[in-house]
Amino acid sequence: MGDVEREVEFGLEHFAPDRKVELPLQDALYAYKAIGEFIRFFHDPDHHATIEDVNRFLGNNREGGLHVLWEAYYQRLRDVWPADVRGWGQVSNLKKRVQS
């Protein structure tokens, strides 16, 4: 397992698999489609043949791939988490909680 996978999966075992969150369908679809765009882009090496291709796709927090991730993370999914879970999405906060 690579570093990214370890960071994403770290601490998930502390949450019951049957716990649920509720969010507007549009917000869930936006986040799903944002992830899908990254998969669409990166699954085909012809899409990212050069660093310029990657930079053009990623853009910044105002447009492009980074913008849609930013929107999904900071706007669409920000307030859906129960109080005892807020902040766990940030690995540094999660590691502090798990170690205590």
Image (cartoon, rainbow, N blue to C red):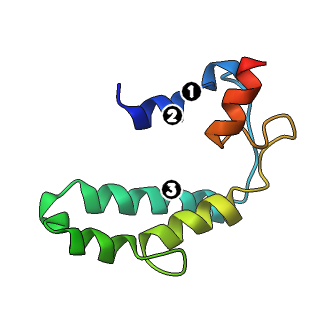
> Toward the viewer: 56 or 39?
56
In the figure, residue 98 lies in which quadrant? top right
Q: Which element carries disc 3, helix, strand or loop?
A: helix
In the figure, residue 73 lies in which quadrant? bottom right
Q: Quadrant of the C terminus?
A: top right
Question: Residue 6: percent from the left, percent from the top?
Answer: 46, 28
Q: Which element carries disc 1, helix, strand or loop?
A: loop
Foreground mark, 2 or 3, reads: 2
Please name the residue that numbered disc 2 is placed on. Answer: 7
User: Which sits earlier in the primary sequence, circle 2 or circle 3?
Assistant: 2
Using residue 86 as the reference point, say whether residue 6 is left or right of it: left
User: Which sits earlier in the primary sequence, circle 3 or circle 1?
Assistant: 1
Using residue 88 as the reference point, say whether residue 6 is left or right of it: left
Please name the residue that numbered disc 3 is placed on. Answer: 32
Query: At x 75% / y 43%, what residue is drawn?
Result: 87
What's the mark number on residue 10? 1
Q: Amino acid at mark 2?
A: Glu
> Toward the viewer: 74 or 22?
74
Query: At x 47% / y 68%, what residue is drawn?
Result: 66
Query: At x 77% / y 51%, what residue is drawn?
Result: 80
- Asked if the residues shown at circle 2 and circle 3 are in contact, with their CB atoms under 8 angstroms apart, the answer is no
Q: Label 2 to label 3, Cα distance in Å? A: 20 Å
Question: Residue 20: percent from the left, percent from the top?
Answer: 73, 35
Q: Label 3 to label 1, Cα distance in Å? A: 21 Å
